Image: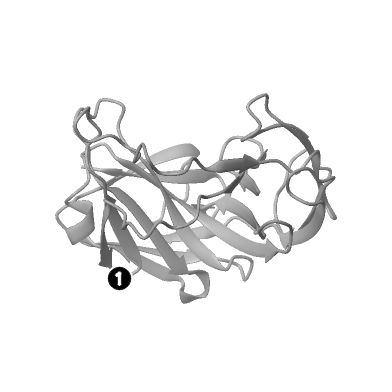
Amino acid sequence: MQVIRAMPNPPMAGARFDLNAPDTGSSSTCERQTFGDCVLTSCPVVSETNPPVDPNAPMPMFLEAGTITVSADQEEFSANGTPSAAGSTYVFQSTGSLTGGGVLTINATGGTVSAFTGTIPFPLAPLLLAPSIDGMKGTVDIAVPRNADFSIRWDARDASEVIQTVVSKPASETTRTPNLSCSFTAAAGMGTLPSTALAQLSAGTRIRLFGVNSRTIEATPRGVALLAAFQLISSDKASYPTFVLQ
């Protein structure tokens, strides 16, 4: 269950519950490389001779938790979600906005997942200190070379636990490239995207950073993960960066 504010869009709620099949002992065919706080994941290309799923493996079991409502203690934001026809994802209707700093309360009436209630602090948007984009407005693309480490400094305003990347591949990409995931301790105030990882991504790959808080609450048959995230913005709060690989 997650609530995310990606600028310039209003906050969006989403939910998905699944109970994976028991481990059969087979290892993943994806390869993982760790570069400091970043992980590069490479999976084999799917083809007729290399299907994405073992046809003999048990199918995953998708779950739902009934109607889910989200409310904020300090702002006029609310969201109401119901399972889609497929039952594995949710459709949410939201009203109001979130500027961060308050607490969200999430309630589920229960279904194949038991009823639950949980709270999670919604972070303030982290402020980008370097490279500075103060004085600009709206979405700002920042060119990032793939042959050099790229360092970022921020002020998480004591409101986020971690700073995480969200990576979007270029629409024109015709070859399969790895996925990059970086998670930095927010209180550290800085992080580096290593060139050894960036060099393996395509030119035109777009990277955004989010301040993130997470919680896990008890439910049956398995605990529910809650996530709240707010996109990094400029320190003058007038713009929001996307880092574009060159």
Location of residue 216 in the rendering, given as x and y in whole percent from the top left corner: 66, 64
Element under label 1? Answer: loop
Residue 149 placement (x, y as % from top left): 22, 62
Give the residue drawn at x 49%, y 45%: 240
Total marks placed: 1
Q: Amino acid at mark 1?
A: Gly
In the image, taking residue 56 as reference, residue 98 lies left or right, namely: right
Q: Is residue 131 visible?
A: no
User: Which quadrant does the C terminus fall into?
Assistant: top left
Report the front residue among 235 and 26: 26
Query: Who's the residue at 56% across and 66% down the image?
Result: 156
- The colour mode here is one colour
Q: Quadrant of residue 9?
A: top right
188 left or right of 65 in image? left
* Image coordinates for residue 207, horizontal then vertical, percent: 37, 46
Of 78 and 30, which appears nearest the observer?
30
Residue most extreme to the bottom: 188
Quarter-wise, where is residue 173 in the image? top left
Relative to 87, residue 39 above or below = below
For disc 1, the marked residue is 36
Q: Which sits in the foreground, 179 or 28?
A: 28
Q: Nearer the viewer, residue 2 or 86?
A: 86
Asked if one can make out residue 228 in the rendered structure from this viewpoint, the answer is yes
